[in-house]
Image (spheres, rainbow, N blue to C red):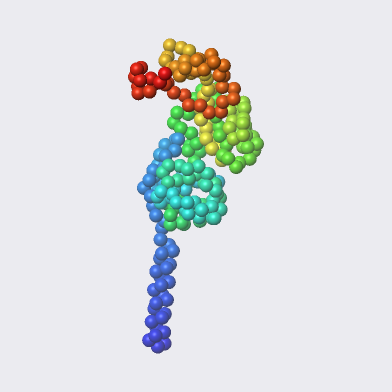
Amino acid sequence: MNKTARYLVSVIVILTLVLGTSAMTPAARSTATVHLKGGSFIPAQGFTQQGSQKYFIVQFAGPVHQAWKDALAAQGAELLDYIPDFSFKVRMNPAIARSVGQNDFVSAVVAYQPEFKFGSDLKRDGEANLYEVRIERGSDFGLIRAAVAQTGAQILDFDGELMLVAAPGSFVDAIAAVDDVASVSNYQLNEKLSNSSAPARNDDARDIIGASVANSRNYNGSTQIAAVSDTGIGNGTATGAHP
């Protein structure tokens, strides 16, 4: 082998080693915290707990670029909701998850955990609690409702992706373990705050903003589609108020 040939072989070997080393360079690791209803953690610090094989948290190396999201979509990942910081809940299978984790702009890929779906204020005791259960969009709502019912929880009502569920607090973990359940929250009945000793309730607001004057002139809001409510105070004093 002449000198030129040996030189070319050496160059090829060096390039192969360099390129191979670059290909194995680990993805950037972010020290950013992921903030969830159930708590916060740093995915890059070795969070290895087993979890869902369908939903994952993907944390990017920094502020998210559209090109990064497009790259994940091209790999077959479906980005769902944003999670601070720099993360998304992603629907994908484990093979795609492994592929996604190889991107140099991905800091960590963590399997979604049932406890990520509820906060620390969730009622965990009692025999007759009401919960609002949200099903992840894009799921088979009927199938998931059936899976929630199989936990022993009683489905009182549902509307699309939302369910009103009655169950003992001990059932929460089983409900949250249904993969396509997105969140479990305490149910709170929306109620009208009527006149009481407390100031500025809903019933009082109509008088504060002068709606009774408009009503007396036959304005009832039946054709109204938008409004701005204002006290009418101009510069913050009675003397500077609009007439």
Q: Residue at x 39, y 78 (%)?
A: 10
Q: Which sits in the foreground, 93 or 197?
A: 197
Residue 90 in the image, given as x and y percentages of width and height:
52, 46
Q: Which sits in the foreground, 146 or 141?
A: 141
Residue 27 in the image, given as x and y percentages of width and height:
42, 56
Q: Is residue 28 left or right of residue 142?
A: left
Residue 9, can we see it?
yes
Tell which residue pokes out farthest to the front in this image.
243
Q: Which sits in the foreground, 87 or 234?
A: 234
Q: Which sits in the foreground, 169 or 211?
A: 211
Residue 98, can we see it?
no
48 is higher (above) or lower (below) than 24: above
Q: Residue at x 40, y 21 (%)?
A: 242
191 is higher (above) or lower (below) than 12: above
Q: Residue at x 47, y 43 (%)?
A: 82
118 is higher (above) or lower (below) than 16: above
